[in-house]
Every structure is written in C-alpha cells, then in structure tokens.
Amino acid sequence: RRTQKKLDALHQASRQLACLQADISDDDRIEVLKHNIRDLTHNLLHYDVIEIRLLDPRTKELKPLLADGMTPEATVRVLFARKEGNGVTGLVAATGETYVCHDAANDPHYIEGSLGARSSLTIALRDGGEILGTFNVESPQLNAFSPREVQFAEIFCRELASALRTLDLLLVERRATATHSIEAVNQSVSIPVDEIGRAHV
C-alpha cells in the first residue's frame, strides 16, 4: 500500500513538471521547469545531489541543465555521449541503459560529482527511442539505491523526459511562429519599397 501511494503521488506530482502557461517568457518557462524538477526530486524522491544534462544531438555533448550538490569542477565538466572516458553519465547517454554505481571508489566508470559520494544512480531521459539527456543522483552511502528506488526514479524520468519534449516542441513552435511573423513583416515592408524603386526608374 505504501508503494502504491508513492507511485500515485509520483504520477500526480509529475504533472507539475511542464509549465504550459501562455503568459510567461521562454526563459521563465525553463526556470519554472527547473524549479519543479528540484522540488519533486528533493521532496518526493528525497535526493539532495542531482544533475541533469541535455544531449546535443549534433555534437553529442551533454550540456548541464541544472545541478544541486555537485562540485564546481563537476558542474563545468565537458561530457559526451560515449561509452568510454566520459564517466557514468556519458555511458548512460550512449547506451540508454540505467546504471547503478554501488561503490563509487571501485567503479571504473565513476567520475567524482559530489564530495563524499559513495554511490550513484544515472538514468537516460528517453522520449520513445530518442535519448534527450541524463538524470544523475548521488549518495554518501554505499549501495544507496535499492531496486524499488530505481523503479521510482525511472518513472520520474519518464515524466521528466515527456515534460522536456513538450517544452522543446513548444519553444520550437514559438520560435517558428516568430520567424514567420518576421518574414511576413519583411514582405509587407518590401512591397512598397519595391514599388517606389520601380516608380523612379
């Protein structure tokens, strides 16, 4: 019953992730999403150290979206979606498979993210077959992530990926609309200018 309650709370709370209000700017919309991610990760999943990176499909670079509790070096670290040389985050982005690091001191893929971390959990943010980025949490305890906690985190990541996709499509649509508006204005301005030019030939 306790597990079902948490699952229900997770599904309900995850609906808060995407802010689709029409009266706020794109930058504010992104900040609201980041605030909601932090709130749900801390208060529902009870993780204090989190890092989310988004995958650039062109360069394969994993660019930071937000980081709480990570060292300054980890926050600015350049990572790519590759199986080797880019830590657990790069490995997960390259394979799409969830990775549980049970003992950070003895894991060849682990690169320090937070001071004193002894285990970590990294999950690919997937929308269908496409990998959008990675979700990483760390703990000062060994073997901190049970199969049930992994399950909860994966459910959360599905909701997070959906919110990221919705936000991305919305921003793309708004940019396209703005571009069309600019083109329409330019065309309407160019007509009389062309006519004036012909009149003086």
Image: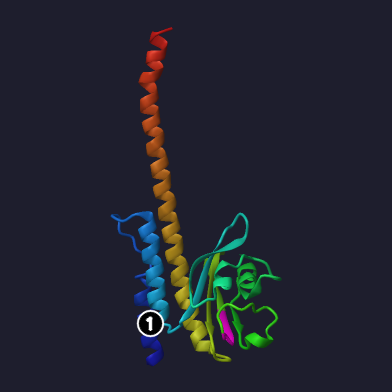
Image quadrant where residue 59 sits:
bottom right
Residue 92 visible at all: yes
- Please give the range of residues in magenta: 116-121
Are there few (<14), some (14-19), or many (20+) residues within 10 Å of tag 1? few
Q: Going by the picture, which residue comes out furthest to the left?
A: 23
- Residue 30 appears left or right of 126: left
| Left or right, 126 with reference to 8 | right
Q: Quadrant of residue 15?
A: bottom left
Viewport quadrant of the N terminus? bottom left
The secondary structure type at the circle numbered 1 is: helix
Q: Is 132 inside the magenta-drawn segment?
A: no
Was residue 119 drawn as part of the magenta stretch in this picture? yes
Residue at screen point 43% across, 7% down = 201
Residue at 36 percent of width and 32 percent of height: 185
Write the residue at 47% across / 67% down. Answer: 161
**Vertical placement of 53 versus 40: above or below?**
above
